[in-house]
Image: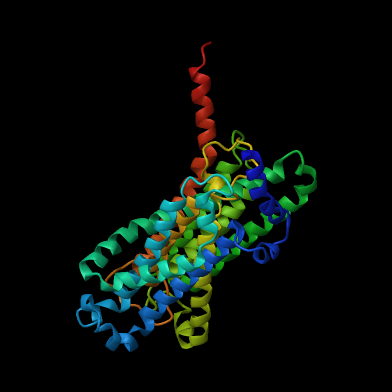
Amino acid sequence: MEEGTTGSTIDPYAKLMKGSWCSQFRHGTNPWMARYVYGLMFLIATLLAWAVRDYGQSALKEMERLKGCEGGNECLGTEGVLRVSLGCSMFYIVMFLSTVRTSKLGESRELWHSGWWSAKFFLIIGLTVLPFFLPSAVIGLYGEVAHFGAGVFLLIQLISIISFINWLNDCCQSDKYADRCHIHVMLLATMAYVVCILGIIFMYIWYAPEPSCLLNIFFVTWTLVLLQLMTSVSLHPKVNAGFLTPGFMGLYVVFLCWCAIRSEPPETKCLKKAEASTRGDWLTIISFVVAVLAIVIATFSTGIDSKCFQFRKDETEAEDDVPYGFGFFHFVFATGAMYFAMLLISWNTHHTMKKWTIDVGWTSTWVRIVNEWLAVCLYIWMLVTPLVWKNKQAAAEPV
């Protein structure tokens, strides 16, 4: 009886797994469709936090009716972002606690994750409104916790990106695809290094136009040094990881350096492009929209990548196993809610942000730079650790 019940539960999902992306939306609630709905809810929460920050003054009279807001002023701006972030994070924490360790399709926790959308919409609305009734002291405490949560999100994202790059390199070097992908790998690696060098040259031209711009010169030069270090370690005979992984990691590191310098305050004299960018409001708006979408995409892609955090990766998957870790997925979104709050307030709970800006300020700059250095350390650690482990095992074996 149990096998028949399990089979009848899995049959509808089997069709979805073999079907197209669109079929996952046409056939009711399922975990494949659910992740996009959660992503949409996260996007709405991000846009709501931005609206509260930039246009919250118009809601001042309405906010005065809330007893916990002391006139409404403290519920706007930076604190308003933290209140929306707290509500969003609490929703995903509730989902994390209620779906963690779900392993099989058809379980009650899987049905809760994939359905009950009416209840969830009421739940997230209630949890979003609730923080506006909390005293400022609680919100200030959450702001401190959000710094740590956002850091955890960045660390998870780094591990996910490095794991993907290593997986891509392993696929290309495998016996099955080695001959077919050899030329493609060389082309991709060459293009990656060309883009890295061009990016470094342009950063020297745009963001270090004068010898007095010592900090930007240091950032860009150290990025070049890190690129050389990753390449040297990757090509070491004992590592032999090839050119592809350091090339792609170089792209990511150069991108982080560029984001860090772009996060410097606009009045910085070394930002040659600052005056032009402040004149074009449309460019600022486009940059903001792209940044918001990047936050959502990064959170979504990291959330469904739970397999790179499994310690036992040799386990065979059964047909009724869940397609991704539900608990991990919601945990990433909970920390992602803290991350978008930090970006909207530039990692400073006492910082006033201009409209249509995101992640601007010296604190944001140093967070990006430290993130860049940490990415390189993690990448080198993932290359060197297997060698150290092998040497320890060899030394432990009796002669």
Q: Position of residue 190 (x, y in %)?
A: 68, 55
Q: Is residue 168 left or right of residue 53?
A: right
Picture residue at 45% right of the left edge, 84% below the top: 278
User: Please, which residue is most extreme toward the front here?
Assistant: 1
| x, y percent for residue 172 | 71, 46
Residue placed at 49% from the left, 24% from the top? 392
Residue 12 percent across, percent down from the top left = 68, 54
Task: Please tell me which residue is depicted at 50% across the width and 61% down the height of the picture.
Answer: 299
Examine the image and state in which quarter residue 177 appears: top right
- Whether residue 150 is visible here, answered yes or no, is yes
Looking at the image, residue 392 lies above or below residue 256: above
Task: Report the residue at 48% width, 87% height from top.
Answer: 281
Is residue 371 left or right of 195 when viewed as pictured?
left
Q: Quadrant of the N terminus?
A: top right
Instruction: Answer with left or right where residue 4 lies relative to residue 153.
Output: right
Residue closer to the observer: 56 or 119: 119
**Location of residue 248 by image quarter:** bottom right
- 274 or 283: which is nearer to us? 283
